[in-house]
Amino acid sequence: MLKFIPIFLFYLLFSYTAYCQNKFEKIDFSEVDKFAKSVKYKDDIFNLTHTLTTPYNTDILKVRAIFIWITDNIEYDYKMYNEGTQQNFSCTGKKDVCETAKIAFENDFITTVLNKQKGICSGYARLFKKMCEIANIKSETVSGYTKKSAHQIGISLSVSHDWNAVQIDSSYYFLDATWAAGYCPINDETGKLKDYTKRYNNYYWLTPFYKLAQNHFPTNEKWIPEKKYNKEWFFNSPYYAQHAIEKIILTNPTTGMLNKNKNDTIHFEFNYTDKINTILINTNNYQNPTLPLYKTSNGEIKVRSNDSLLLKRIRYIPFIQKGNTYTFDYIVTEQTLSFLEILLDYRVAMKFKIKVN
């Protein structure tokens, strides 16, 4: 067990890392990104890593080059995920023999990912860790839970994902090369993943804990900066749509599992970095109509329809805006209410489960 002083220093370190302004966010990485995408793998991870990192004299630029190369070149192996065919290391021999065997297994595992240019989350995370190790940068693999759908709200989840923590200038930062590289739609009926779509998402680059914890949560307590965060808090947290997650910070309610009585008022408050023009609410009892939309020259989302009957079915929610803070109230009028989703400018942004007593 760690002693008091190391724990204090660790939490102090992570409080700084998780809650201060990311000191790297104003760096223009465009030239690093362009260079990283031009580098080809030639059957040697050491040569690959040195090629990517030698041009730079700071860890942040080296880490960026490694991260971008992985997200640009490694495709998510959704077939392996669906079939559950990834091999895991096991050894029942002597400790020194198993340690040697594990090193060989890890090297073969990473080489396979590079040669196939495919992998699932553990492949992305192990490859990133290994390349950082070659570049003399400390990185660790973080295992934990993820929330991918509203159905998972309030459910005790299984450990299902790996990502990384990397040390830069004495502080740790989280990043997830898997989710940054692209995405695979989920078949709601079978739970299987569909075709992989490559689409870089910078949200998962040096993500502060309080933001990453909107859909990631580690099993190891050493990665958790404050006691208010625990796995029960994560299991019960709302679902955030991917397009909105980087823009939104919910301050009320503090949970995605709402226990209410009929005629109770639910007060919603959140910060949102973009301008919001409309708020709608869908429930299990009422769904606003699906509307054809278009974006104006100034970025505003508008409805493209002259159907007066259709437009009359839209239930707009009145709200108050003060700067980037938005507030509104919702009255629970139905005993049968079980879920609620908030649409910002006609797109689902957050989902909650509700139990009406």
Image (tube, helix red, strand yellow):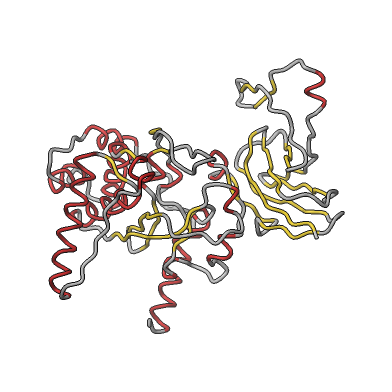
Q: Quadrant of the N terminus?
A: bottom left
Tell me where residue 301 sits by quadrant.
top right
Q: Is residue 211 left or right of residue 267?
A: left
Residue 174 in the image: state x and y as whole percent: 40, 55
Q: Is residue 47 left or right of residue 202?
A: left
Q: Is residue 101 left or right of residue 89?
A: left
User: Compared to 33, does 209 lie above or below?
Assistant: below
Residue 80 in the image: state x and y as whole percent: 33, 44
User: Compared to 11, does 306 lie above or below?
Assistant: above
Identify the residue shown where x is 44% and y is 77%.
8
Residue 288 in the image: state x and y as whole percent: 74, 33
Tell me where residue 229 sits by quadrant.
bottom right
Q: Quadrant of the C terminus?
A: bottom right
Identify the residue shown where x is 27% and y is 58%.
88
Residue 291 in the image: state x and y as whole percent: 68, 25
280 or 187, which is in the foreground?
Answer: 187
300 or 97, which is in the foreground?
Answer: 97
Q: Is residue 136 left or right of residue 349?
A: left
31 or 11, which is in the foreground?
Answer: 11
